Amino acid sequence: MRYLRAFVCFGLLIVTTKLMANAEFIRLKDSADTIRSCWLKCPADAMESGQAVRTYLAGRTELSQSEINQYAIISGYLPRVYIDRGEHQVAEQIVSDFLSKNIEPSNPVDKARAIVNLGIVYKNTGRNLLARDTYLAALDIYRAADVKNAVGNVLNNLALVSSSNGDTGEAIKYLLEALPLVEENANPLAFASTLSNLGAMHIDLAQFDAARNYLDRSQAVLDTLDFSRKHVEVINYRVRLETDLGNKELARELAQRASESAAENEFYDLHSHSQYQLGRIAFNDKAFDLALSHFETAKNVLETTQSLSARLRIDYFIAQIALENEELDEAEKIVNSALDIANSQGLGLEILRFQHLLVNVYKAKGEHQTALREFDTLFNTYKERVTKDKENQVSQYSVLLHEEEKQRKLAELSEENALQTSELLKEKQSRQQYIFSSGAVLLLLVGSLIVLYQRRKLAIFKAKKAQELVERKNQMLSDVSHELRTPLAAIKLQIEMLEYQIAEDPKQTYSIVHNKIASLNGLINDVFQLAKADAGELDIVFAKIKVRAWLEKTVATYEPLVNDAGLSILLKVEFDYDLMLTGDERRLSQVLDNLIANSCRYTDAQGEIVVTASATQSHCIICIEDSSPGISKEHLPQLFERLYRVDKSRSRESGGSGLGLSICQALVKEHGGKIRAENSDLGGLKVEFTLPLFQDGDRDE
């Protein structure tokens, strides 16, 4: 009887354990279903379910296949909640925990969805190398499963990564590959999204006819669907297009329509962005009160979102308006508040922008010592950002190399397993089978060696590129530091003369300090322009330009400066007033200003400057040449290198930063042109650049 009771108790214990396990699995499945259905519409419920299930899974060392399947579903949807909230670290941890277990769900697509979430985290946190590698891994899974719609979505994400890296050509290639996939899969919203992304890429390339065509096709698809965020996004792309074409009134009308639609449908981020665009349009027209009204509205709407970068973008223009209106204390307050936010979030580019603006604020207030200190802070921040970018690149390469090493070890384990299997077969099979299996092992070995060799070459290539990037950035820092040393030493000397009251003429000494600070500010402005050019962030507003009128106006403004330098200037134009090109007049004038100013600095007295303009069927050719002294041929190929000077001491005395020709080259390249230098027949230097002409069918003003 006693044994019977023990047997019954043992049986009840087994049944109870199984019932508890079933209850836990049912709870796990219910949580997965809640997360999958609520991540977009009711994210708070998804987060609550996710927190409970993460605690449960963390305590499990072994999972059944059914539990693995539910875990994969949770890892595919729960991270999106945290990504949308801007909590990327939590999202990354969820996916990393799942992937670190090396478990395979029954449906590989569920795992691919989790991998895509990791790619989104990498993309949003600026780790584009890791994002690209992660998206490609997900792409392989989706292609193997023949899920065309998912393949199209991942290709869209890869296009965004390529665009962030400045490779618009590769981005367009991915989008064109995605286009037929989302169209064939009868997913009109994804089709419209791909078309609009193509339109945005062509706007970046200034191919406005193609951009308009893609946006029109996207709008035609959206007109057949219920109203969604994508409708407003396409309108915002059109605002960019019309702004770049110079159609300000149409751009303003479209931005207003986008703002009203976004507000009506509670798309707060898009409502804020539309108001920001309206503010930019008004700011460019110098309607500062109207611009401020739009920026304040955009900022108020942003209070309901998590986008700090968008808020800082708005604060930058509000501070600019305060500076323009000479409300200097208010400008200083806005900038300092923005710097606190940018520093707390580690937003390097925003820190640089606001510190540069703060230098200008203090300069406008006449606080030159404070401006100089802020300039030092700005320069140190720039160096820290360069170092951080270098460390970020090295870190991403390290992760990729670690992953390659992991794959190599798995390949070696697979090879060992194949060899053991071959040994067993040799004992059981005939001599003919033995020879066949040995040949198969040999082929496998050769294939593995080839794969390892290719991976090693790739690793060496990546390491070499990373080293080259580090060396270029270090050289740039060294050159800039060298260029700052002389003016800073001069400022220090003049200040000490004032401090010890040994300056013969204090007013002249103050003037010297002021001029040196202006020189330093000019240098950092040049460095900032080149940094923006390297990042592809130069503000270029394209419009029609009547070339002859523009040249006459620009050259006329320089006649007094040229005459003061004891020189003469002559303009020769070989075409009439009807010839036009498409470009940003302010930026192109900056090119002419730099070139003419260089001639004024370095041409001997009683010399001459000749500006010549001619045209071919497709291009305008502008040439600036001056009289002696000339430049040795060995120096000509290096003139456009940053901080390069033929005569360093003379260049500094003349006030040149050594960056003017580099900036000219970047601006001409942004306009699709070319620039070169050679010796002039007049005895000095000849700089010639070409620009594409306006053609019939190009964008209107």
Image (tube, rainbow, N blue to C red):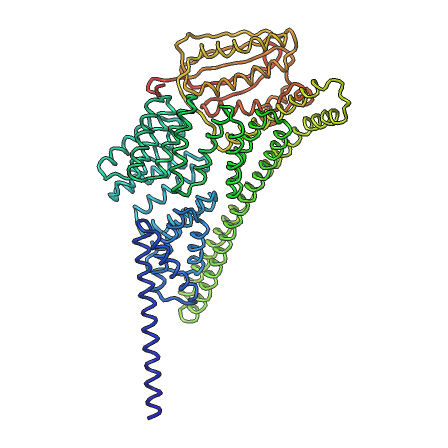
Quarter of the view holding residue 687: top right
Quadrant location of the N terminus?
A: bottom left
Q: Is residue 392 above or below residue 374?
A: below
Relative placement, left or right, of 615 versus 607 is: left
Quarter of the view holding residue 640: top right
Relative placement, left or right, of 223 versus 594 is: left
Q: How many marks?
A: 0
Q: Position of residue 447 (x, y in %)?
A: 46, 53
Q: Is residue 277 above or below residue 550?
A: below
Quadrant location of the C terminus?
A: top left
Q: Residue furthest left?
A: 224
Q: Position of residue 152 (x, y in %)?
A: 33, 43
Q: Nearer the viewer, residue 14 or 466?
A: 14
Q: Position of residue 216 (x, y in %)?
A: 28, 30
Q: Residue furthest bottom?
A: 1
Q: Position of residue 285 (x, y in %)?
A: 41, 21
Relative placement, left or right, of 483 versus 699 is: right
Query: Residue at left 33%, top 35%?
Result: 233
Quarter of the view holding residue 377: top right
Query: Residue at left 47%, top 22%?
Result: 673
Q: Nearer the viewer, residue 52 or 169?
A: 52
Q: Is residue 58 above or below residue 179?
A: below
Query: Residue at left 36%, top 32%?
Result: 274
Q: Is residue 11 above or below residue 539?
A: below
